[in-house]
Image (tube, rainbow, N blue to C red):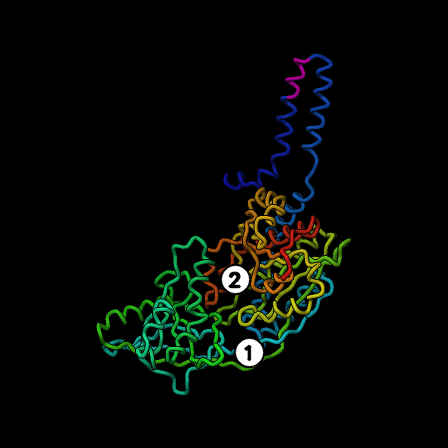
Amino acid sequence: MAHQQNSPLARRLCSNAAVKRNARGAAAAIMRRMSTALRFAFMILLGSCLLAQDAPDPFRERAIAMARDALRTHNSHALLGRLLHAAPKRLAGSPGAKAAAEWGVQEMTQMGLKNVRLEEVTVPVWDMGATCRVELIDAKGAVTVLRSLPLGGSEPTPDGGVEAEVLSVKSFGQLRTLGEAAKGKLIFFSRPYDQSQLSTGQAYGDSVIQRGQGAIEAAKVGGVGALVRSAGSGGPQDDYPHTGAMNYEDGVARVPACALSLKASDALAAALEAAAGGKVRVRWTQDCANRGTAPGWNVVGEIPGATLADEVVLLGAHIDAWPAGDGAHDDGAGCAHVLEAARLLLTNAAPLKRTVRIVLFANEENGLAGGKGYALQHAAELPKHVAAMESDAGGFSPRGIGAGGGKAQVEALADLAKHLQALDLGTVKAGGGGADISPMAPHGVPQLSLHVAGERYFDLHHTAKDTLANVHPRELALGAAVMAITASWLADNAALPRPEAR
Ligand SMILES: [Zn+2]
């Protein structure tokens, strides 16, 4: 297609020959009109220009080779398929989490990474259970089942379930003004995800506080449970509830919490509006459970550096996932990104000066024990971690990378940005990092993230729709290429400015 011919990658691949042909033709015409001395000077100038044309840019050639390798093989999608086959359900502390860690070791070993190992951490164990049934009983007594999922970490409903009147609030401030009226009620946190935000991550962050703190705030006013509108960006007909982590607070009753799909939330809101002074009730049973702690594992492997082996460029993603779907985008895609990046580096870029370390972190979703454990266990070598980069935004088309250290880091990455732009793979922007690598930030480790097109991520993540079928092989491959290109640049160039260790 014409569009493909005009892409920066295509232009780059076919431009050199045409440029040189045109330059030689024009030069011959000029020389025919010149004196001998002028011809001599002109030939020297022209020679040096053509030499410059011919001088290959090794980094550019390497970046192109890695991108084409990723696209030709679609190996990242195959990797993701194998993870989802080996461990479709892999929340920390579950049998699937162990299977996933074993899969990680096997993949790393097979591709030739060195020092492959499991590093143990202690993770919480939460069982999602088999049942979450929410029935809406409207003011006229009609019953509708609302699609729901328990929130991660929630307690079950009491034996026999809970049935109570529902009160809807849009904010914690509004909830606190209800006083006695909230006692014994189910609190429905109904504030919608703000579709007008340009950043889907920002919109998610603004809406997710209802999920994280809703049960605490409900219990503080005497509520008996929290029904939370899903923190998702789907349309009004979206009937897939989004689970995700929620919190309890010491000294505050641990009331159950669940997420309602957007469609279910709209139905509940409509019933409340139609009630006209009547009461809307919900009958709710869920059998999830907290079961203490268990061992979990960060999976680690390396491409040892050739000359600066003690300096580390870390590429990370998290291997755990909510069991609502298969965690294909969140964060199976990230695991595929970093493993495929390692393969691309081994095949197309090694030897590199610094060590590239791949880490599949345990327990990002409900506790961050993997990221915290890594920072603790590796505290002594963090001054020599020149950068940590995380992929945890899904397997969508890359838009470049984010640098958490602000303007100074973005400027230091200008050369990398130029190469990414030339290949139509995005650019470098201020603002980046990831949950798993964040415990390294206080030690001054520069924080980077893979940026991807985020428009569909919050339709899918933490839902039953987060499956392999919704991950596009080409988009996934290009994300892996950006991680490999970035790691290659970081491993061979001057270290980034470090924020002060705290
Ligand atoms: Zn994630």
Q: For the image shown, how many numbered marks are present on the structure?
A: 2
Q: Is residue 478 visible?
A: no
Q: Residue at x 71, y 28 (%)?
A: 48
Q: Position of residue 215 (x, y in %)?
A: 42, 75
Q: Tell me the tag on residue 483.
A: none
Cα separation, mark 1 vs mark 2, equals 22 Å
Label 1: state its secondary structure: strand
Tell me if residue 55 is in the magenta stretch: no
Q: Which residues are magenta?
A: 27-34
What residue is disc 2 on? Answer: 329
Residue at 50%, 64% (x, y): give it.
Answer: 467
Residue 204 point in image, percent of width and height: 45, 61
Q: Is residue 31 magenta?
A: yes
- Position in image of residue 138 (x %, y %): 27, 76
477 or 160: which is nearer to us? 160
Tag 1 near tag 2, CB within 8 Å? no
Residue at which label 1 appears: 125
Quadrant of the rendered image containing residue 498: bottom right
